[in-house]
Amino acid sequence: MSIFGNYSRKKKLPIDYHEKKLENPFYKRRGRIISFANLKGKLIVFGSVLILLFIFWFIFISHFWVITKILITGLDQASNDKVNSLLNQQMRSGNFIFFPQGNLLFFNEKKFQENLQKEYHFQSANIKKEWPNGLNIIIVNKPISCIWNEGGKYFYADTDGYLVQEISPLDLKDNKYPLITNLSSLKIYNGRIPLDPSYLDFAALLFEKFSKIMPEITIDRFNVDDNVDTIKLVTTGGLTVLFNTKDNADKQLNNLLILKNQKLKDDFKKQKIIDLRFGDKIYYQ
């Protein structure tokens, strides 16, 4: 008997690897990496959404940018109220349909400036944003040309004939501007007096020069009526002098001075009407 007999008859049993858990120490589990990446991604997305929501709230909803401080300079109280009304109207509207103009970020100062110039005929209107919630509106009116009297009311009027503001009769005592009384059939329309600006320029020129050549005579007012190209200077003594607004003012004043000093002399104060509208032909009574 061979000594290898028993060994050779023993059968090798198969090894079952399905029940064993084998791990490679050099291999990292994929599941853990995927889980960590998903969590980080979710946090980034969630954080980004929060940031966007905060930005949206801060810009569109919060009161940080809402216009609450408004400073208007250069106007009287009545005109100030009108500008405020126009401003509130624009603030209630949207810029590009969606963006609220009550928000300083979206307030269109150029559009408001154009609306002011169109509505009130100011010489200039400068709008400055005062961050984060203020507006500074600086108005410059056109120069005052005269005081316009119509229907028992008195108004400052600018050089273009637009009414600036109503004033009290007590303000007439200062006598800084020519007083023009409207006796014509045409009346104030859309905030403008019914005269060509050339009439206002002519009255202002007479107002300035008459007192220099005749300081002893005081102008009470100027009258305008339905006579074309005519303006009437009325003195405190009751004399009415008719001027042609299309003719040279200096020439007509010089004719008046010659009439006073060389022709009428002491009788000048007795005259009621002097008509200078026809060149060198002067009519008086």
Image (cartoon, helix red, strand yellow):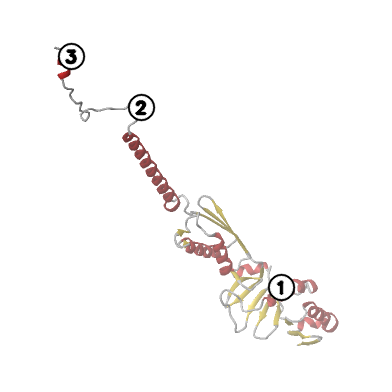
**Mark 3: few/some/many CA within 10 Å (<14, 14-19, 20+):** few
Q: Is residue 237 above or below residue 175?
A: below
- Quarter-wise, where is residue 175 in the image? bottom right
Look at the numbered discs 2 and 3 and tell me whether their residues touch, using CB distance below 8 Å: no
Quick one: SS at disc 1?
helix
As measured in the structure, the alpha-carbon distance from the residue carrying label 2 to the one carrying label 3 is 43 Å
Quick one: SS at disc 3?
loop
Horizontal side of 63 relative to 109 (left or right) equals: left
Q: Which residue is more in the foreground, 231 or 66?
A: 66
2 or 3: mark nearer the eye: 3
The amino acid pointed to by label 3 is Phe
The amino acid pointed to by label 2 is Phe
Q: How many marks?
A: 3
**Mark 1: few/some/many CA within 10 Å (<14, 14-19, 20+):** some
1 or 2: mark nearer the eye: 2
Look at the numbered discs 1 and 2 and tell me whether their residues touch, using CB distance below 8 Å: no
The amino acid pointed to by label 1 is Ala
Q: Which residue is mark 3?
A: 4
What is the number of the mark on residue 140? none
Q: Quadrant of the N terminus?
A: top left
Q: Which residue is more in the foreground, 73 or 90?
A: 90
Query: How far from the left and from the top, in percent, is residue 149?
Result: 61, 75
Q: Residue at x 60, y 72 (%)?
A: 154
Horizontal side of 39 relative to 202 (left or right) equals: left
Q: Which residue is mark 2?
A: 26
As measured in the structure, the alpha-carbon distance from the residue carrying label 1 to the one carrying label 2 is 103 Å
